[in-house]
C-alpha cells in the first residue's frame, strides 16, 4: 500500500503520523471494508480524509453503510464527483 | 575458654574467631557479655554481623555503651551509622563527647553520619588537622586524614607529594607513609598502571607482588583488587577460577573460605551466584535466606548489601504498611530511608515499588522538584538516575527535540548522548526502542538490516544482534515481509510459529509473532469454539484473554473488531460497566481509555458543553480534552467532534495564526485542524485571489495541497470558469477525486486536439 505520507504531513502536521501508527489496525480494517464495498480508489479518499479512516471500525462501517444507503448504488461515482460527500464520515 | 561466654554467644548465634573468644575470656565476664548482648540486640537492634565485626564492644560496660548511645541519639547520629561502627559505643564517654563536638564544628553532622569513624579520633587531632589542612583539602579527604594513623608532618608531606606528581589527594592516600606513597606512584608510572585512590591500600612491594602474580596468571589488574589483603588474593583467584566466577569487583572484598562457603550455600539453596553475595558473610547469608523462607519472599541480589536484621525489619515494615509485593529494589535502602520514601509516595501519589527505591528520599524530592520546575511529567524510570543525571538527560532531550518519555532515563547521560549523536550523524530518526540496546548493538543491527536490505523499523531493536540476524535469515528464506512484529520474540519462536502455520496450513498474521505456537493453537481452537473467524488483533492477547473478550462481546452484543482486543477482559468489563452507568455506548474510541478516564471525560463534556461526549472525544485523555475545550472556548471556536483529532497545542497554533493574519471569522473547526504551514500557504494564495471568503462556506479545498489547487484553478481557467460559484462556494472541481480530475483533463486535451 502506497500512502503519500509526506502529503499528509504537509497538510495535517507531524502528529498525523503518530495517529496512523497508533491506529494502524483500524486504518487497515476500514480501508479493507470500503474496498470490499466496491470503492477501489480508497487510498485517495484516505489521503483527503485521513481522520475518517482512523475511527473505530464499528463506527466507520455504520457511517459508511448509512452513506451508501443515502447515495444509492451509484455511490462510487457520486463520491468521485464530489468527495465532500465523504465529510460526514469524519464528522460526528 | 569459659563455657559460659561461649554459651552466651551461642544463644545469640554470634560466631567469633578463636583469638576473639580468648580475648573476651581474659578481659570480661560472661555476665557482662550477656548484659551487653541483651542491650545491643534487644534494645538497639544491632545486627549479629556487626557485633561479629566488632567483638571488643562486648568487653565494655553496658552503662557506658548505653550513655554513649543516648548521647549519639540526642545528637541525631542515625542508628545505622552507629550499627556499622560499634567501636564508637565502646569509647570513654568524655572522649566521645569531645570528639563529637570537634567533628561537628569542623565537618558538620552530615559528614559525621557518613563517616562515623571520626568519633573515634581524639578531639585534639581533629582540631589540629582541620586547622593545618582545612584550606587545602576537601572535607571528605580531611576526614580521611583525621581517621588515618598519619602524623601531621606525614600528612603535610603526602599532600606535597601528590601536588608534585599531580595526582588528586584522596582519603586512601593516607593509608601509606610518605615514602611509600612516592614508591607507589613511581611503581605505577613505571608499570603504566593508572593511579587511582585504591592503589594506596598497598605499599610498593605489595603492588609489585600483585602485579607479577597477575601477569603470570594472565589477569588484568583492576582497582577493586588493591583493597584485598595479599594473603587472600591468590586464594580468591584460585577459588574463582576453579568455580568459573568472574574476577572482578566485590569478590575481592571477601576471602577464599567465604567464597567457597557462599558457593556451597548457593548450591544448597539452588541460588544463582551473584556478585553482591560476596559483600556478606556466609553466616549472614544463611540468616538472610532463613528470613526469606520464613516470610515466603524471593531472595534477590540487593538483599546481600543489608544485614539479616535490616532485611527482617524491612519486611516487617512492609507488612505493617500492607505492601503486598516486596520487590528486590526495596532492599537497596535502609529501613529509615524506606519510611521516608513511603511518606513521599503518599504525599506525591507515587507507586511504592520498583525503581523508586534506587534513590534516597532527598534524591526523590529533588527529582520531583526538577520535573515541577521544567513542567515535565514525572516518569518512574527517572529514579534509575541521580537528580544530576536526570537534569543532564532532560537537557539533552531539549537540545535534540526529544520527548522525555520513560525509556530515556534507562541510560546514563553519556550513553544517551552517544546514541542520539550516532543517530543524528546517520540521519536516523530517534525512537525510544533504540534505547533497549547499547550503541555497539545498534551499529551491528543497522549493518544487518543494510546487509539484508530491509527497512530499519524501531522494533528491530527489541532483540539483540544475534537474534536479529537469525530472524532476518529465516524471513528471507521463507519469503516473509520484514515488519516490526517479527522481532517481538526470539528467532527460535519465530521459526516455531512459521513451522506451526505451515504444518497446519494456516495463513500467517503479523501479530502471531507475539505468541508461541502453543498459544496460537489455543486461540484458533477458541475461535472454532465460538464460531468466529480469527483476526490479526486477537494474537496480541493471550488465549485466556481472547476467550474472555469473546465472552464479553457475546454478552454485550459488541462487534468483533480490532478495538475490542485493545484491552484485557477485566479492563473491558470495567469499561462496559462505566459505559452502562453513564449511558454511553460501549464502542469505538471508548476502549482506548480507562474507566476512570471515561468518567472524567464524561464529566468534562457535561460540565463544559452540556452534553455527553461524542466518540471522537475519547480519542484523547481527559487532560487533553479539557485543554482542547479551553482553547476553543478562549477563541470562540465552535466545538465539534473534529477538533479532538488534534492536540490543544496544535489547535492553538493554527488558531492564533489564522486570527492574527486573517481574522476570527475564519476560525472554523474544519480549518483549524490543518497544519499551520498548509493553512498559511493556501489562505495566502486564496487571499491573493480575493477568494478567501469562500472558505467559510466550503472548507473542502483545504484537503488539497497548494499544487493541486493551482492545477485545478488552471484547468478552470482553460475552460473559462471561475474558481467560485454564485453561492460563494468553491467550484466543484476542487471536490472531485484525482482520478475524476485526470479524466476531465484528458477529455479537455482530446477536445482541444479534435478542435484543431
Image (tube, helix red, strand yellow):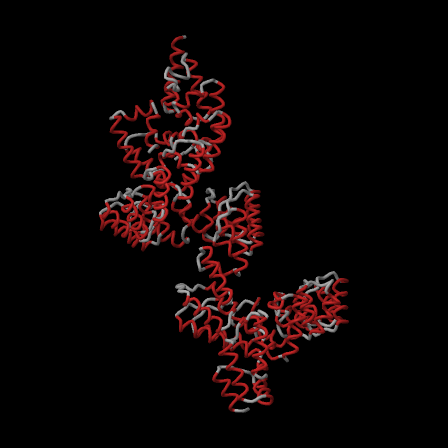
Q: Quadrant of residue B97?
A: bottom right
Q: Is residue B179 left or right of residue B542?
A: right
Q: Quadrant of residue B81?
A: bottom right
Q: Quadrant of the N terminus of chain B?
A: bottom right
Q: Residue furthest top?
A: B756
Residue B6, x across and y down, in percent: 52, 88
Total numbered labels: 0
Q: Is residue B371 above or below residue B718?
A: below
Residue A84, x across and y down, in percent: 35, 25
Q: Tell which of B665 and B500 is nearer to you.
A: B665
Q: Quadrant of the C terminus of chain B?
A: top left
Q: Is residue B221 above or below residue B626?
A: below
Q: Residue furthest front?
A: B74
Residue B111, x across and y down, in percent: 63, 66
Q: Tell which of B271 and B245 is nearer to you.
A: B271
- Does residue B208 appear anywhere in the picture? no
Residue B575, x across and y down, in percent: 31, 48
Q: Tell which of B259 and B498 is nearer to you.
A: B259
- Does residue B487 appear anywhere in the picture? yes
Q: Is residue B59 left or right of residue A48?
A: right
Q: Quadrant of residue B112?
A: bottom right
Amino acid at each position: 500500500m502506497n500512502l503519500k505520507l509526506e502529503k499528509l504531513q504537509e497538510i495535517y502536521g507531524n502528529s498525523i503520523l503518530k495517529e496512523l501508527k497508533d491506529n494502524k489496525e483500524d486504518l487497515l480494517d476500514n480501508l479493507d471494508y470500503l474496498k470490499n464495498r466496491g470503492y477501489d480508489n480508497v487510498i485517495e479518499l484516505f489521503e483527503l480524509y485521513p481522520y475518517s479512516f482512523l475511527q473505530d471500525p464499528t463506527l466507520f462501517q455504520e457511517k459508511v453503510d448509512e452513506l451508501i444507503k443515502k447515495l444509492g448504488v451509484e455511490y462510487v461515482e457520486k463520491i468521485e464527483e464530489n468527495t465532500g460527500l465523504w465529510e460526514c464520515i469524519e464528522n460526528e | 575458654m569459659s563455657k559460659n561466654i561461649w554459651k552466651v554467644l551461642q544463644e545469640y548465634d554470634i560466631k567469633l574467631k578463636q583469638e576473639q573468644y580468648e580475648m573476651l575470656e581474659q578481659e570480661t565476664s560472661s555476665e557482662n557479655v550477656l548484659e551487653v548482648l541483651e542491650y545491643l540486640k534487644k534494645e538497639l537492634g544491632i545486627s549479629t554481623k556487626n557485633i561479629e565485626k566488632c567483638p571488643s564492644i562486648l568487653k565494655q560496660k553496658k552503662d557506658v555503651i548505653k550513655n554513649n548511645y543516648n548521647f549519639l541519639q540526642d545528637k541525631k547520629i542515625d542508628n545505622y551509622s552507629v550499627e556499622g561502627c560499634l567501636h564508637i559505643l565502646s569509647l570513654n564517654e568524655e572522649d566521645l563527647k569531645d570528639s563529637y563536638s570537634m567533628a561537628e564544628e569542623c565537618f558538620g553532622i552530615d559528614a559525621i553520619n557518613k563517616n562515623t569513624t571520626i568519633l573515634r579520633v581524639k578531639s585534639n587531632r581533629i582540631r589540629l588537622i582541620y586547622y593545618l589542612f582545612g584550606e587545602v583539602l576537601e572535607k571528605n579527604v580531611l576526614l580521611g586524614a583525621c581517621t588515618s594513623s598519619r602524623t601531621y608532618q606525614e600528612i603535610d608531606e603526602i599532600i606535597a607529594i601528590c601536588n608534585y606528581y599531580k595526582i588528586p589527594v584522596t582519603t586512601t592516600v593516607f593509608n601509606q607513609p610518605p615514602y611509600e606513597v612516592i614508591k607507589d606512584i613511581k611503581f605505577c608510572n613505571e608499570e603504566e598502571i593508572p593511579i587511582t585512590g585504591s592503589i594506596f591500600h598497598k605499599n610498593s612491594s605489595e603492588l609489585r607482588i600483585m602485579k607479577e602474580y597477575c601477569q603470570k596468571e594472565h589477569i588484568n589488574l583492576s582497582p577493586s583488587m588493591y583493597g584485598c589483603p595479599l594473603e587472600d588474593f591468590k586464594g580468591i583467584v584460585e577459588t574463582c577460577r576453579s568455580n568459573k566466577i568472574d574476577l572482578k569487583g566485590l569478590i575481592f572484598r571477601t576471602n577464599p573460605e567465604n567464597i567457597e562457603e557462599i558457593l556451597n550455600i548457593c548450591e544448597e539453596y539452588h541460588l544463582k551466584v551473584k556478585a553482591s553475595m560476596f559483600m556478606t558473610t556466609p553466616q549472614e547469608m544463611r540468616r538472610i535466606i532463613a528470613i526469606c523462607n520464613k516470610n515466603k519472599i524471593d531472595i534477590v541480589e540487593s538483599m546481600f548489601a543489608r544485614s539479616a536484621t535490616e532485611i527482617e525489619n524491612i519486611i516487617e515494615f512492609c507488612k505493617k504498611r500492607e505492601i503486598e509485593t516486596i520487590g528486590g529494589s526495596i532492599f537497596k535502602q535502609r529501613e529509615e530511608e524506606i519510611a521516608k520514601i513511603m511518606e513521599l509516595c503518599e504525599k506525591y501519589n507515587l507507586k511504592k515499588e520498583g525503581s523508586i527505591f534506587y534513590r534516597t528520599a532527598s534524591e526523590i524530592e529533588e527529582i520531583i522538584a526538577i520535573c515541577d520546575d521544567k513542567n515535565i511529567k514525572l516518569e518512574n524510570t527517572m529514579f534509575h538516575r541521580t537528580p544530576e543525571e536526570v537534569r543532564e538527560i532532560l537537557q539533552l532531550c531539549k537540545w535534540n527535540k526529544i520527548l522525555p518519555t520513560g525509556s530515556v532515563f534507562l541510560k546514563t547521560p553519556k550513553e544517551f548522548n552517544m546514541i542520539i549523536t550516532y543517530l543524528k550523524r546517520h540521519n536516523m530518526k530517534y525512537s525510544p526502542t533504540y534505547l533497549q540496546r547499547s550503541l555497539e548493538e545498534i551499529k551491528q543491527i543497522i549493518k544487518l538490516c543494510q546487509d539484508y536490505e530491509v527497512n530499519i523499523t524501531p522494533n528491530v531493536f527489541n532483540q539483540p544482534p544475534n537474534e536479529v540476524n537469525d530472524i532476518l535469515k529465516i524471513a528471507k528464506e521463507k519469503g516473509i515481509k520484514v515488519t516490526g512484529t517479527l522481532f517481538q520474540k526470539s528467532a527460535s519462536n519465530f521459526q516455531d510459529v512459521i513451522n506451526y502455520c505451515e504444518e497446519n496450513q494456516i495463513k500467517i498474521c503479523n501479530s502471531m509473532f507475539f505468541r508461541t505456537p502453543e498459544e496460537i493453537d489455543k486461540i484458533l481452537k477458541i475461535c472454532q469454539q465460538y464460531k468466529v473467524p480469527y483476526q490479526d488483533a486477537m494474537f496480541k492477547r493471550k488465549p485466556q484473554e481472547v476467550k474472555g473478550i469473546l465472552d464479553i462481546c457475546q454478552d454485550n452484543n459488541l462487534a468483533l473488531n480490532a478495538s475490542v482486543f485493545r484491552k484485557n477482559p477485566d479492563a473491558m468489563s470495567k469499561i462496559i460497566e462505566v459505559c452502562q452507568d453513564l449511558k454511553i455506548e460501549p464502542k469505538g474510541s471508548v476502549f482506548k481509555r480507562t474507566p476512570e478516564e471515561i468518567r472524567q471525560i464524561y464529566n468534562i463534556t457535561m460540565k463544559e458543553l452540556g452534553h455527553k461526549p461524542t466518540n471522537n472525544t475519547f480519542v484523547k485523555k481527559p487532560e487533553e480534552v479539557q485543554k482542547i475545550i479551553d482553547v476553543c472556548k478562549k477563541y470562540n471556536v465552535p466545538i465539534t467532534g473534529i477538533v479532538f483529532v488534534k492536540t490543544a497545542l496544535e489547535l492553538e497554533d493554527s488558531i492564533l495564526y489564522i486570527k492574527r493574519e486573517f481574522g476570527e471569522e475564519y476560525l472554523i473547526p474544519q480549518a483549524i485542524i490543518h497544519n499551520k504551514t498548509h493553512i498559511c500557504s493556501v489562505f495566502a494564495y486564496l487571499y491573493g485571489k480575493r477568494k478567501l471568503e469562500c472558505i467559510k462556506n466550503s472548507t473542502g479545498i483545504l484537503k488539497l495541497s497548494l499544487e493541486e489547487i493551482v492545477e485545478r484553478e488552471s484547468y478552470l481557467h482553460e475552460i473559462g470558469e471561475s474558481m467560485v460559484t454564485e453561492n460563494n462556494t468553491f467550484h466543484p472541481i476542487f471536490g472531485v477525486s484525482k482520478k475524476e480530475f485526470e479524466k476531465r483533463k484528458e477529455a479537455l486535451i482530446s477536445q482541444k486536439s479534435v478542435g484543431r
